[in-house]
Amino acid sequence: MGFRINETQQISLNDRLKNLTVRERKILDNSWAKPFGDYIFPLINEERFMPLFCVDNGRPPSPVNVVVGSLLLQEMQQLNDEEMLESVLLDIRFQYALRLTSFDEMPVSDRTLSRFRARLYEHEMDTGEDLLKEEIESLAEEYAKRMSIKGTLKRMDSLMISSSCKRMGRLELMYTCVSNLVSAIIASNEGHLLPEHLHKYADESNKNAYCYRLKKDDVQTRLEALKEDALLVYELCSSAQGGTDEFQLLERMLNDQTKEGQLKPNKDIKPTSLQNPSDEDATFRRKNGVGYQGYVGNVVEDCGENGNIITKYDFDVNLHSDSEFAAEVIEKLGVQEERTVIVVDGAYPSEANIEAAKLNNIELVPSALSGAEPNPIVNEFQIKEETITRCPTGNAPISSDFNEEKETIRACFDRSTCENCPLLGQCPVKIQKRQAVVTLTITTINRAALAEAITTEEYKELARKRNGVEGIPSVMRRRYGVDDMPVRGLVRSKMRFGFKIGAINAKRVIKFIQSIALIYFFKGKSMDNFTHFIYLFFCRSLVSINFGF
């Protein structure tokens, strides 16, 4: 298909809006369709998606901004592809939002959305370039700019996301991998490569009897027998089926579950091991005592008086830690012109992240610290030029030095002084034969300082601002079904996650615009003036405007 910019957005003589009564038009203008069509749809950058299509070659596709807008509306309204198609064809609100009211025939079909998602997937698999993420974050920046959200106060949170694949036990996982490969071999007319007893794995009715209808004491026996069959299939078919997905998954399963031909103990199986052949990217992680199989999403929300917008997001396997997300966000943000505060929970800060943030004029403000509480006495040592000058009771050390390799400060004190100190039970000093020694790591010192800082009123006030971002995981689960996405695999799941982020932002912009309209209404100003004002503000102005309501 050839790429073309959608230039057919003007009202025609046969525009469907002309057939509406005054009452119908008023209801339409007060719905979500008008702000979406007037202020969100025009911001979609069609040229960003040009690499998905040929240039000046082939028939033109459905307008890209119509497709991207449809996918955002699909998430906003929680519709499947068939319901979305019906809505675009028959519902004037969707046509108004996508500026299609003048089209004689709607430029969408039953495959339009799925084909576009497939193009996005193939492009990212081939190039590693996530065009959708770029567009969603670009739109978010425009929203934030035009809502006068400066971005100097951000808050960040992550959420565990379940894979839609079934959670399998060890026996079922091994059986499924063997069964898939045996079935593929028989389907390719190469069943003669296998001994007769292996053909049972191609029988769908055999799985329940093999995996479920057995006593607990028989599980290990079945696992051993299954392992032998898996190794036999692997050896017999390595040449004929070596390049197929089924063979590669069996090979991965054997590497995860066995070592030198023997089953690994359960404790030796890594979280990165294959969880289900239907979703090979999903990983296993235990968090707060709960086991999760799937992925993890991370969101960064810019906060302002006029609202909040999710300006950045990430998506990865669930072994990706909050600390790693923080490092990536700091790197992407780069050096900030103004001091920027990111409010996070205790899992995000690390020594490296705090230092990297400082270099970029960013401050990570944790609402709490994870792990054991640092010793508060550590923060009472006077430290100057990487040496201890005074202890908490004011005594000077005999000597103090800094070990650059280990990043530790060591100080020696008079033994008798420390033995009679009232803080002896609290101080990290170690009484030796001739002297008393205190050894503090830079990490311990910084952690103690941070623990004291978060008890101040300034930090407490910032920490309270983080509470709002914790509602995003709840909304994504309850409203947007993030744990039940009808796709599998990291890239496809990330794509659906991105559209959900885009839908959340779009709904916030619509709510913001409608709230301004309400204010104008109560001030007695005409909606015509308001519409013109907002149009200029959202579509032409490059200057941030403070409404001052």
Image (cartoon, rainbow, N blue to C red):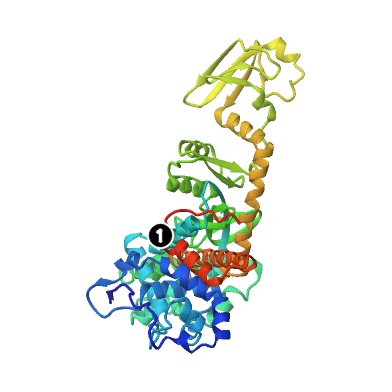
Residue 279 appears in the picture as rendered? no
| Residue sitting nearer the eye, 29 or 487 | 29
335 is higher (above) or lower (below) than 481: above
Q: How many numbered badges does the structure rendering display?
A: 1
Q: Is mark 1 on a helix, strand or loop?
A: helix
Question: In the image, residue 371 lies at what x, y percent?
Answer: 64, 41
Disc 1 marks which residue?
A: 134
- Specify the quadrant of the image occupied by residue 400: top right
Q: Residue 403, position in %: x, y? A: 50, 22
**In the image, residue 16 above or below residue 455:** below
Q: For residue 55, which quarter of the picture?
A: bottom left
Instruction: Residue at 43%, 64% (x, y): give it.
Output: 539
Q: Is residue 68 left or right of residue 375?
A: left
Name the residue rendered at 64%, 41% in the picture.
369
Above or below — where is 466 with respect to 253?
Answer: above
Q: Where is residue 154 in the image (x, y as percent from the top left)?
A: 55, 49
Sort mark 1 into few (<14), some (14-19) or many (20+) by Cα contacts within 10 Å. Answer: some
Which residue type does callout 1 highlight?
Glu
Q: In which quarter of the image is residue 237?
A: bottom left
Confirm whether residue 391 shows in the render: yes
Q: Position of residue 303 (x, y in %)?
A: 57, 52
- Which quarter of the figure is the N terminus placed in? bottom left
Quarter of the image containing the C terminus? Answer: bottom right
Left or right for 394, reference 74? right
Farthest-out residue, left: 57
User: Is 524 or 519 nearer to us in this picture?
Assistant: 524
Comparing 505 with 429, the one in front is 505
